[in-house]
Image (cartoon, helix red, strand yellow):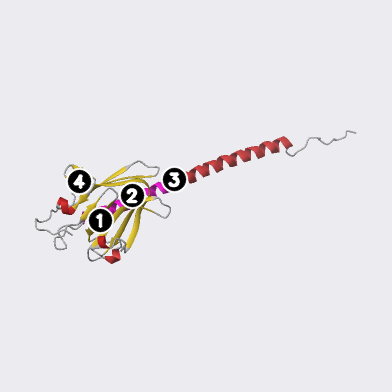
Amino acid sequence: MAQTGKSGESAGFTLLELMIALGLTALLSLVAYSALSLSLKAMRHGQAAAEQVQELRVAQTILARSLSSAVSGSLDQRRYFIGNATEMRFFTPVPLEAHNMGGIYHWRVLAGTDESNQLVLAVEQTKNVNWFRDPEGVEVRQIIMGNLTFLRFTYGQGDEEYETWDAVKARGLPHWIRVYLTQKGRAPLVWFIHLPVSDFRDDARSF
């Protein structure tokens, strides 16, 4: 009578097969994590770059709008626009805050510092037209661009570029202003801001 025997081969996975499977799983997980990490870094970098571009655009718009509206020949024909390499003072009807519309404002645009002593482009405003007699009388101060490593202003008339400007001596406002600036980790920029030409009368009084 014939006898039937049982097979001695196992139907399960061997230890070697399990180790290979775990190794492949770990490798695939590492590849997936690396791809996700790179995607997140690229997204954060793109977002930071977009925020910097927006900051530049807003700061340039604020300066261009206020400077192009700088008052000359007003306030009883008083001349007032003083500028040097690190700051400029002038009158403008454009306020920093929209709800303060109405009147003439005294602006000071300057190379200042923030709380961490980092170079910034700042704007100070007051409605006191005699602000130079009360330099601490600032009503609104706003940092419109931070993280700077270099900032300088120059003033022009025609093709000539000057380091300083005094509206009394020059008998009027500059025709244009250049702002040289560099943000940390970025290429240098030059903003060209045109001012409407308006000369003062010969009998104009100084401010």
Which residue is pictured at 66% across the width and 40% down the height? 22
Residue marked by disc 2: 56
As helix, strand or loop, the secondary structure at mark 4 comes to: strand
Q: Is residue 29 left or right of residue 138?
A: right
In this rendering, the label closer to the viewer, 4 or 2: 4
| Whole-percent x, y for residue 107 in the image | 26, 58
- As drawn, the label of residue 156 is 4
Question: In the picture shown, does residue 20 fall above or below 176?
Answer: above
Q: CA distance from mark 1 to mark 3?
A: 37 Å
Q: Amino acid at mark 4?
A: Gly
Residue marked by disc 1: 89
In this rendering, the label closer to the viewer, 2 or 3: 2
| Whole-percent x, y for residue 173 in the image | 18, 52
Quick one: label 1 or label 4, which is nearer the N terminus?
Answer: 1
Q: Amino acid at mark 3?
A: His
The residue at the far right in this view is 1
- As drawn, the label of residue 45 is 3
Q: CA distance from mark 4 to mark 2?
A: 22 Å
Question: In the picture shown, does residue 172 fall above or below 7?
Answer: below
| Whole-percent x, y for residue 26 in the image | 62, 40
Magenta stretch contains residue 66: yes
Quick one: label 2 or label 3, which is nearer the N terminus?
Answer: 3
Q: Are marks 4 and 2 in contact (CB under 8 Å)?
A: no
The residue at the far top in this view is 2
What's drawn in magenta, residue-wise? 46-69
